[in-house]
Image (cartoon, rainbow, N blue to C red):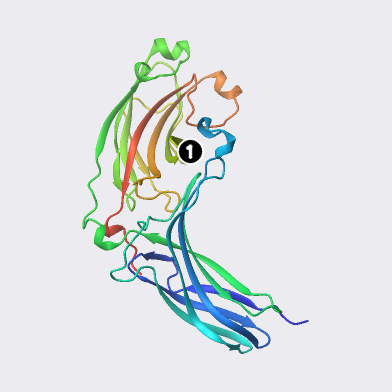
Amino acid sequence: MATATTVNVKLSRSNRIYRSSEPVEGKIVIKSATSISHQAIRLSVNGSVNLQVRGGSAGVIESFYGVIKPIQIVKKTIEVKSSGKIPPGTTEIPFSLNLREPGESIVEKFYETFHGTNINIQYLLTADIPRGYLHKPLSATMEFIIESGRVDLPERPIPPEMVIFYITQDTQRHPLLPEIKTGGFRVTGKLATQCSLQDPLSGELTVEASSVPITSIDIHLLRVESIIVGERIVTETSLIQSTQIGDGDVCHNMTLPIYVLLPRLLMCPSVFAGPFSVEFKVCITISFKSKLAKAQPKSDPTAPRLWMALERLPLELVRTKRDQFSC
């Protein structure tokens, strides 16, 4: 039985990270037990912002689902090899594709790669090998990552913009258990609300007083995705990751460091475009000892609870030249 012919796209950079001003280079690798004829070998690049509004999200009716067209960033095709034959064995065909030509007018900005809940910014390379009506065409697709170009970035990382916060029973907008409300508590600290993607989220936190023992202190990273649908703005907030910085009833008046690494593909520089935006927030949660907490099922860790205190802060993410990966 003959071995099936396979096609793969292999990029020149193992991290698959490129800037829009750079050519995307690599090889189309074809493995075949026999020689195959083809009409041409073409390489296509497709970059787009895919917007999705799920039925019922933020009060949006079901009819809105699936009506939002993707925003095209780049779409072009080049012929890598004209029609002919591919010999048996392994054949590697090099390619170089410019995402944008010098002097070419840009319809849409090259937004950075981002995979969110309702917003996905994705760049794909596809190799196509048509073989005529009697043979099944061959194809392969590879995602690559776009980051901001060096020219548009500041030389130095932006110094973290530290914001001082305090959390007490009086700052809470949701009801608390009577023993927490009457006994009182006070948590203070500072946090960087503007930082580079390369750097960790940093700050500090101190429990000054608490009448009820604390069980956990957590830092949650949130993404806030907004999409314009007709005359409405649909916004959804979702959890990216959680980091515990205090376990149990921590010592009072002891400074706890905040040090959270940022996940690359789930975060990007804050984006404020016309039809959509991607923002980020930090949610600090203080969980107090309570029998109710054990009885309730765990769901959204940032949802207001009777035994929890919350503080949400905006987080602006930027990229600098120091954040660029060496290739």
Q: Is residue 66 left or right of residue 159?
A: right
Q: Vertical placement of 176 versus 96: above or below? A: above
- Judge whether residue 199 can be spotted in this image: yes
Question: Which type of secondary structure does the marked residue at label 1 adopt?
Answer: strand
Name the residue rendered at 66%, 79% in the picture: 5
Q: Residues within 10 Å of mark 1 (few under 14, many from 20)?
A: some
**In which quarter of the view is residue 227 placed?**
top left
274 or 148: nearer the eye?
Answer: 274
- Judge whether residue 253 can be spotted in this image: no
14 or 5: nearer the eye?
Answer: 5
Q: Vertical placement of 10 versus 224: above or below? A: below
Q: Position of residue 325 (x, y in %)?
A: 34, 63
Q: Position of residue 304 (x, y in %)?
A: 47, 24
Q: Which residue is mark 1?
A: 238
Q: Vertical placement of 291 versus 269: above or below? A: above
Can you say which quadrant of the picture contains the C terminus? bottom left
Farthest right residue in view: 1
Name the residue rendered at 45%, 15% in the picture: 175
317 or 199: nearer the eye?
Answer: 317
Q: Vertical placement of 149 versus 94: above or below? A: above
The amino acid type found where label 1 is placed reads Ser
Q: Position of residue 125 (x, y in %)?
A: 49, 68
303 or 150: nearer the eye?
Answer: 150
Name the residue rendered at 40%, 28% in the picture: 250
For the image shown, how many numbered marks are present on the structure? 1
Can you say which quadrant of the picture contains the N terminus? bottom right
Q: Position of residue 197 (x, y in %)?
A: 34, 51
Farthest front residue in view: 230
